[in-house]
């Protein structure tokens, strides 16, 4: 019985160590996964996910130059007049520098705002920071490419 307890304890210790090592070994993959979760939460209007993914001092600049804090962004997206049908990312690149990750890519969005249809073809830059709470999004910028 003692050997079984030892085995179970050793198994969980090794599993936790490997999990921590994987996090340190490939933070770009973790950030990319979180970027996809943010995109999914955006489409679903998942306020709970936003509260987890976005840092308290999060700031976003959207296509028309408007900036939102975390609270302002959540209120804007949680309103009844905003609906996202298609949020697609492509050409996504993640660069990690210590506890900071910069994600860049192309973005295509289709939806309705105030009952009017819209479509954006953007470039984006997201900045993630790793803290004791894990990776959180601290800044985001979306811009329409010049033609």
Image (spheres, helix red, strand yellow):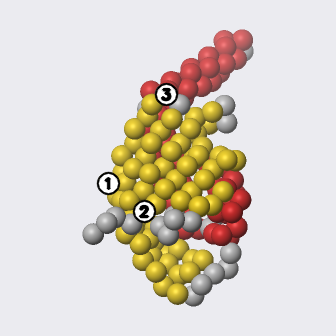
| Secondary structure found at label 2 | strand
The residue indicated by pointer 1 is 91
Residue at (69% x, 63% y) in the render: 72
Q: What residue would you read off at disc 2?
A: 143
Q: Residue furthest top?
A: 2
Q: CA distance from mark 2 to mark 1?
A: 15 Å
Location of residue 24 in the rendering, given as x and y in whole percent from the top left corner: 49, 27
Q: Residue 27 vs residue 115: left or right?
A: left
Q: Position of residue 94 (x, y in %)?
A: 40, 42
Give the spatial CA distance, label 3 vs label 1. Answer: 23 Å
User: In terms of sequence position, does the residue under pointer 2 or pointer 1 come before the other?
Assistant: 1
Q: Earlier along the polypeptide chain: callout 3 or callout 1?
A: 1
- How far apart are the two marked residues, 2 and 3, measured between alpha carbons? 26 Å
User: Where's the N terminus, which quadrant?
Assistant: top right
Asked if labels 3 and 2 touch by Cβ distance under 8 angstroms, the answer is no
**Image: 52 above or below 15:** below
Q: Which residue is mark 3?
A: 98
Question: Can you tell which quarter of the image residue 75 is in?
Answer: bottom right
Which residue does the image show at 67% across and 14% down from the upper left?
6
Image vertical order of residue 21 relative to residue 38, above or below: above
- Residue at 36% across, 46% down: 93
């Amino acid at each position: 019985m003692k050997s079984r307890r030892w085995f179970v304890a050793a198994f969980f210790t090794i599993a936790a160590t490997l999990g921590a090592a994987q996090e340190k070994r490939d933070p770009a993959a973790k950030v990319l996964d979180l970027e996809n979760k943010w995109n999914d939460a955006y489409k679903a209007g998942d306020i709970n996910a936003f509260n987890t993914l976005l840092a308290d001092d999060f700031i976003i600049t959207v296509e028309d130059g408007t900036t939102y804090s975390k609270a302002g962004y959540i209120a804007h997206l949680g309103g009844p007049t905003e609906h996202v049908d298609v949020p697609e990312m492509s050409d996504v690149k993640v660069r990690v520098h210590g506890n900071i990750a910069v994600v860049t890519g192309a973005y295509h969005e289709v939806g309705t705002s105030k009952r009017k249809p819209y479509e954006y073809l953007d470039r984006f830059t997201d900045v993630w920071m790793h803290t004791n709470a894990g990776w959180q999004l601290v800044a985001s910028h979306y811009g329409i490419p010049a033609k």
